[in-house]
Image (cartoon, rainbow, N blue to C red):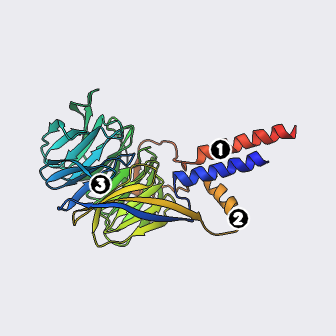
Amino acid sequence: MLFAVLAVLAVLALGSLVYPVAGQEISGSEVWLSGVGDPVMAVALSEDGLYSPVITEWNIYVYDQNATVLWRYPVSHGESVAISSDSERVVAAGDHLLLFDREGNIIWRYKPDSRIRDVALTADGRTICTATDAGLCVFSLNKERTVANVSWTFEAEDRIKSVSVDGGGTGTVAGGAAGDVYFLSGDGRLLWTYRTGNGGIKAVISRDGSTVAAASSQQVILLNRNGQLLWKSSVPGRIVDVAISRDGSTLLLANGGVAVFNRSGENIWTYATEEDIGSVSAPSASMQFLTGAFDGSVSFFVLQPETISCGTPDDTLSNAVTAAAEPSQTSVAPPQGQTTSQQEGMALSPTTPVAVVASAAALIWLRREGR
């Protein structure tokens, strides 16, 4: 019996480390604050939290974990920035598409026909996705990640405002000016379109590819990989950027401040500031994130789970086990709000496989003891 209890407790501990659960209190702290002098257009954060590229209209900066600027490079009409998981490649977008190595040396550049509005990079840094008014253009790099060629393109019915790609490059998400969310395969085939009815959509996909988030001016929606609606919520203030953690468990919105939601749609933490935050990045599952503001400030934050509230110890344990063992509740998007041409497996809560394995191990042990 002792082993079974320990197995359940292990699942609960792992779940609290992976993502904030329902009813869990969250505290946040600003680790460092810096400034670049010009309005920040976009930020990116490496998965280990050690490197932080920041782009303004005229410069790209890369910070280390101590808020030291490692290097700076001038750009023209900077719009977006991204970094590979190993931090060896940084890509900046604006009038030009620039690929840098870790030390800030340009190793490849490209001049598009129209300004690039957004850019995304796969975890290995071998695929670059760009969004322009004309659509999507995706580049594949060679083995050395020094030369890129166009891999595929996609033309949408409206102007593309944002692009995001999962870590393996198997799923690409784009947000359109008319409010549509497009999901494409790794080779550029359109798999589904979700119509939000709201203009100026910013869409992102988690690194593990399980979850898609999209935000308009005052509303945010969460979808699974199949385009099924998980939840939607109205948010005060004007949403200008959205970020999602690697496992899809935590959603962050830049709306002047920062609003943090868990996978169930609960607003678990809010940061109000006079800095007018307009960009946010949170690529890992460690609850670290980076923000950029229109006043030129750059901040690095860490969120920490505190306690699981409500109920007696027995009730809390029972409820937490249920939450860890069951997948997140999903609902099918209205037929008129979604066009789907291919179905994939339903996204589960990140701890579901762990809970199943732990439960099975406990049952096997109990049966052996009974003999």
Q: Which residue is mark 2?
A: 313
Give the vertical position of 129 relative to 37 (above or below).
above
What amino acid type is highlighted by mark number 2? Pro
Q: Secondary structure at mark 3?
A: loop
Q: CA distance from mark 2 to mark 3?
A: 42 Å
User: Looking at the image, which residue is at 34% across and 56% down?
Assistant: 290
Give the left or right position of residue 309, taking residue 65 as reference.
right
Q: Secondary structure at mark 1?
A: helix
Q: Which residue is mark 3?
A: 67
Examine the image and state in which quarter residue 189 appears.
Answer: top left
What amino acid type is highlighted by mark number 1? Val
Q: How many neighbours does mark 3 have within 10 angstroms: few (below 14), some (14-19), or many (20 or more)?
A: some
Provide residue 215's location: percent of width, then percent of height: 35, 60
- Tell me which label, 2 or 1, sits earlier in the chain: 2
Q: Are marks 1 and 3 in contact (CB under 8 Å)?
A: no
Q: CA distance from mark 2 to mark 1?
A: 22 Å
